[in-house]
Amino acid sequence: MDLIKLSLSVTNCYLFRNGKGWVLVDTGYEEDWQLFRRRLAFVGLQIAQISHLILTHHHDDHVGFVGELVAENPAIAAAMSESTRELLLVGKNDQSYGGGLINRRVESLIGLKQLYVSLRTGKHQRKENNLHFRPYTARRDDIVFSGEPRLHDLGIELEGRILATPGHTVDSVSILFDDGDCMVGDAAANMLRLAGTHNCVIFVTDLEQYYASWRKLIAAGAKRILPAHGRSFPVERLAHNVGRNRPENMRRIVAASALTHSTTSGEVTGVDIVNSQEASK
């Protein structure tokens, strides 16, 4: 598989070949747009060559410049879960399910994030924009899916499938290729190891569910984890680190506001591919 990693301010975007075109997995912050264009030009590609965009979840560091991207190339088909489609309409990271930072050490470092992003992008990240993004409405030719479709169902020629991997967010999905490569978004990470993250991303909505998604990836045959934050690593690291972070050590910054939410189990069956017009009916 032809695979390219583009490292933006804090987010890795991945590109893999789809016939004569390329599939992009996630974007970065809105402030990353010009950095993305430079990174893309550096590897000799153009936005016109991107055929699909797959979104692993709705957070601002993964969807920040979706609007700019499809405005420049309207032929890009953006693929997302039904949950992600709904959350993109809101324009901010969903916090209604609760959640928190993984531990106290991460909490002490999080205040440096905006400064770091500003330095990396050369563009000031305003405090009021933190956790916000421009709302996005799925277009007629975008792909909104439920269940766990094969990539062929999304019009992508490679062998692989989407797996629901909630825990970081309720809408998190991963892309597992039949060769064992797995693009996980924020379902796992390789960042701030000295802060004791143990391959967790810094913010988790449901830690028990997060670790259940790791077990699911292992059972599904993942071999190499390609995270949105940090370098790739072997799946054995997930097996080693399951359960090392404890719920009682999390720094609760969001209390669940609605106990009526149903919990996504991640054990989703069936495939239902619909375009955005059908999904809105």
Image: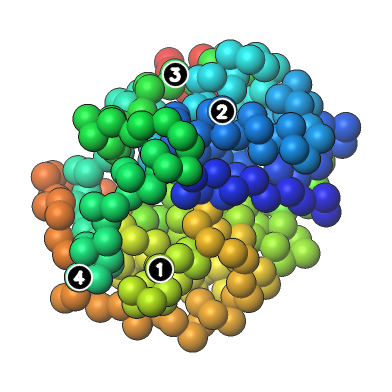
Query: Are the residues flagged by discs 3 and 2 in contact, CB closer than 8 Å?
Result: no
Gap between marks 2 and 1 measured at Cα: 26 Å
- Determine the residue located farthest toward the bottom in the rendered image: 240
Whether residue 120 is visible to the viewer of this picture, yes or no, is yes
Gap between marks 4 and 3 measured at Cα: 37 Å
Q: Is residue 156 left or right of residue 92?
A: right
The one of 81 and 252 positioned closer to us in this rendering: 252
Please name the residue that numbered disc 3 is placed on. Answer: 137
Gap between marks 4 and 1 measured at Cα: 12 Å
Observer-side mark, 2 or 4, equals 2
Q: Name the mark on residue 104.
A: 4
Observer-side mark, 4 or 3, equals 4
User: Which amino acid, mark 1?
Assistant: Leu
The residue shown at (59%, 64%) is 231
Element type at mark 3: loop
Q: Name the mark on residue 34.
A: 2
The one of 42 and 207 positioned closer to us in this rendering: 42
Location of residue 121 in the rendering, given as x and y in whole percent from the top left corner: 48, 37
Element type at mark 2: helix
Give the mark, 4 or 1, whose residue is nearer the N terminus. Answer: 4
The one of 232 and 120 positioned closer to us in this rendering: 120
Residue 30, by quadrant, is: top left
Q: Is residue 77 above or below residue 180?
A: above
Please name the residue that numbered disc 1 is placed on. Answer: 192
Residue 140, by quadrant, is: top right
Element type at mark 4: helix
The one of 45 and 146 positioned closer to us in this rendering: 45
Give the mark, 1 or 3, whose residue is nearer the N terminus. Answer: 3
Give the mark, 3 or 2, whose residue is nearer the N terminus. Answer: 2
